[in-house]
Image: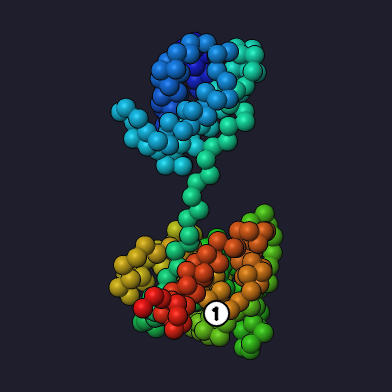
């Protein structure tokens, strides 16, 4: 058994080239697996069956001895190491069967996206708007665009000036390029249209002039006239949140989550939100409906005369 584990770890080191920290995790997970096998009196690979691996998974979740219970993510990582070991042992002729093949790692609990209250979003947007300098105009336009369209940060900084159309009336749109190169046309609300138009007229030309004659098609530019980076865009949001006094953790994805949640709270159909977000499957979007159901439950409990016991 020990020789088989050493051979597998050597394989991960030499053939797979895994990072040191990853190898350390595999080594620790397999050491715990061997302790489980020893406790069960199993000393050979062929003495392991599916029930042995399943019992190990249960032990991981329940804890025991010096080991506290593991959450679903940590237990899943450990089982992945065990499955990889048995798959290798079978392929390398060290075992006749793969007893872990049918043992599925536990599914991590689905985390609900964190949306900001509308008041926090508005405070952040206002904090990015003053004073009236080219960079402040850019920052306000960027944040209004992120919240107003649900764009990913990579999509926003990847925008060119030509991707924005008809900002002077309600038919204003932007062309976003999402994952896998998929494009989608998204409407732009009045606040974002106004902010982007102000930036294009009074902010961007000043930033272009700092580029030493190097033309850049990017919509959002840095102080040197180059395209704004993801890291810089992230910093714009964090600084605006600090100025607004918003203490919750805020990231560009927070604005995207807020965009989706606020749309659904306002009565938007989940498939419309799916199209706006650029999700390939409505299943991905439906996680936001869980947030909305919580909101509906709270409203129902406080508003309906027979929702609570007297």
The answer to whether residue 178 is seen in the rendering is: no
Q: Could you say which is closer to the camera, residue 305 or residue 273?
A: 305
The residue depicted at 61 percent of the width and 13 percent of the height is 95
Left or right of 305, for residue 50: right
Q: Choose top left, top right, bottom left or bottom right for residue 237.
A: bottom left
Residues 46 and 234: in front is: 46
Give me the residue at 45% from left, 58% from top: 231
Kindly identify the residue that appears in the image at 46 percent across and 42 percent down. 72
Q: As displayed, is residue 40 above or below residue 258?
A: above
Q: Residue furthest bottom?
A: 169
- Reply above or below: 102 against 218: above
Picture coordinates of residue 5, whole percent (x, y): 49, 16
Residue to which mark 1 is pinned = 266
Q: Which quarter of the rendered picture does the C terminus lie within?
A: bottom left
Pick the front one: 126 or 70? 70
* Mark 1 residue element: loop
């Amino acid at each position: 058994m020990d020789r088989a584990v050493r051979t597998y770890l050597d394989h991960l080191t030499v053939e797979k080239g895994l990072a040191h920290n990853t190898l350390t995790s595999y080594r620790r997970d397999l050491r715990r697996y061997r302790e489980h096998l020893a406790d069960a009196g199993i000393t050979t690979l062929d003495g392991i069956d599916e029930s042995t691996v399943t019992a190990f998974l249960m032990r991981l979740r329940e804890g025991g001895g010096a080991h506290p219970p593991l959450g679903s993510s940590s237990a899943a990582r450990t089982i992945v190491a065990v499955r990889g070991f048995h798959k290798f042992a079978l392929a390398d002729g060290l075992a006749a069967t793969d007893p872990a093949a049918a043992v599925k790692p536990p599914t991590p609990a689905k985390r609900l996206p964190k949306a900001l209250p509308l008041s926090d979003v508005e405070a952040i947007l206002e904090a990015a708007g003053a004073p009236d300098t080219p960079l402040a105009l850019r920052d306000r336009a960027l944040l209004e665009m992120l919240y107003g369209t649900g764009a990913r940060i990579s999509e926003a900084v990847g925008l060119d000036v030509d991707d924005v159309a008809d900002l002077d009336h309600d038919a204003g749109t932007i062309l976003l390029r999402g994952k896998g190169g998929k494009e989608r046309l998204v409407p732009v609300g009045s606040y974002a249209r106004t902010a982007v138009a102000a930036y294009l007229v009074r902010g961007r030309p000043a930033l272009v002039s700092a580029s030493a004659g190097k033309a850049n098609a990017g919509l959002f530019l840095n102080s040197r006239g180059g395209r704004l980076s993801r890291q810089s865009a992230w910093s714009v949001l964090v600084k605006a949140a600090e100025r607004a006094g918003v203490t919750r953790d805020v990231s560009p994805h927070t604005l995207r989550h807020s965009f989706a949640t606020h749309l659904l709270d306002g009565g938007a159909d989940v498939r419309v939100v799916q199209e706006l977000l650029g999700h390939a499957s409505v299943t991905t979007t439906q996680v936001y409906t869980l947030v909305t159901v919580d909101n509906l439950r709270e409203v129902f409990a406080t508003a309906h005369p027979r929702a609570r016991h007297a």
